[in-house]
Amino acid sequence: MTANPPHPRSILLADCDVYYVQLARLADPEGAGRAELLIVGGSAESRGVVCSATYEVRRFGVRSGMPISRAVRLCPQAMCVPVPRALCSEKSEEIVHVLKRFAPDVESASPDEAYLDLTTTMQTVYRGRSLEELAHIIRTAVERETAIRVSMGGGTNKLVAKLAVELAKPRAGTGGNGVHIVAPGDEAMFVSGLKLADFPGVGPKFQEELARCGWREVKDVIDVPREELERRLGERSAAWLSDTIRGIDDSVVEQREEPKSMGREETFARDVMDDATLERELLQLVDRVTSDLRDSGYAARTVTLKLKDSDFTLRSAARTLDEPITTYHAMAPLVKELLRQLRKKRRVAARLIGVSASQLVHIGGEGQLALFEDDAPGRETERQRVLAAAMDSVRSRFGRDALKLGQAPRDRGARQA
């Protein structure tokens, strides 16, 4: 690709505005929905990290990835809530469903970001409409049908769309109205005033390497000869940086690949030594994972248990089955045995526990599920599937908390991670 192709591409990035904040407010309109100062990621006492925060909280210096304990010190009046995990995947799928009505190629870059390639449809279906006009139409449709606000960045490639969406966001200081489009031919000018740290792919270590060369902004490096870039950075990094600081990117919008695994984990507010408590927490995660599998139309052949000890030692154990499973009652005995094995080998307090399902197959597809008469561990019976279907029906009608498996009444001292 060149900077000015004969038929420039039309790429949009739909980026959900403070996605987890929006989800938390949808999940709890009377609580989180009314809080101007809101941190999403866990309780104020948890050892988790900030997933998102309102723009009002960010003015206090709170950032995503920051330990919640530090965020609370910076903004002690903020309300802290956990991530509503079930809503996360649900809304992400709803958004992609809407986007696919407008573009033949949609790539889910993350739960809150998706690229659209409208190059062919702009020439056929949407003749006479500008990319900016279409972006506003898509943005309105997404919010109307999913209750989630998105910002749209656009241009001739994914890099420019990613950078443009930051100017589209309606937060203080940007003046964004939800859409920002970079016209074909303006890519180099658009990126010329940016800092190198603003570019996706320029992480902390690369920033340090560039800073040692005296390069912190595009203007510092734009006139550096290619030979010097290669001498200092290596051929591959030099080629990438040379294109990036000119707004050149030939990567394509690709459909999302099939998931390789599904998992859940929990980080405890305090290290847990008690086996019964660990098992109880684990079984709740099994309930969530098997529900995720059925919701997504998958079954799993391999189940993996993960433990992170109080000294941060990470351990795991796995079991692969002859036939894939989807239900709590088939998976629970397996993970309980894996937990016993790990605890027997090393008995110390745990700070995290998790379970994942892999070797996924589509239900009803190539991996058609087998049925068994007995209830042996790892063998899924028709009775178990009927029970799971009934539970799914109740939860879809009355909410996930209507039925809980593997949980005894108690004061929860942990967060979903």
Image (cartoon, rainbow, N blue to C red):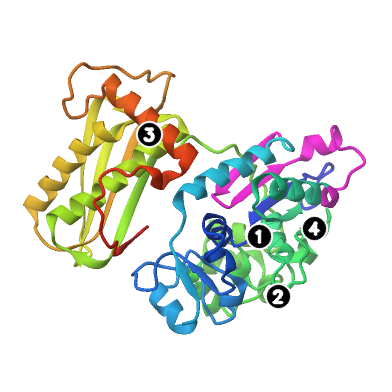
Q: Is 164 left or right of 397, judged from the image as shown? A: right
**43 or 317, which is in the foreground?**
43
Closer to the chain start, of discs 4 and 2, is 2
Q: Amino acid at mark 3?
A: Met
Closer to the chain start, of discs 2 and 3, is 2
Closer to the chain start, of discs 1 and 2, is 2
Question: Would you name the residue on which mark 2 appears?
Answer: 172
Observer-side mark, 1 or 2, equals 2
Closer to the chain start, of discs 1 and 3, is 1
Observer-side mark, 4 or 3, equals 3
Question: Would you name the residue on which mark 1 appears?
Answer: 244
**161 or 307, which is in the foreground?**
307
Residue visible at 50% across and 45% down? 89
Question: Would you name the residue on which mark 3 appears?
Answer: 391
Task: Tell me the SS state at disc 1.
Answer: helix
Measured in 3D between alpha carbons, the distance from the residue under mark 4 to the one under mark 2, in whole angstroms, is 21 Å
Q: Position of residue 107 (x, y in %)?
A: 61, 42
Q: Are marks 2 and 3 in contact (CB under 8 Å)?
A: no
Q: Position of residue 8 (x, y in %)?
A: 81, 45
Residue bounds of the magenta highlight = 104-133
Observer-side mark, 2 or 3, equals 3
Label at residue 266: none
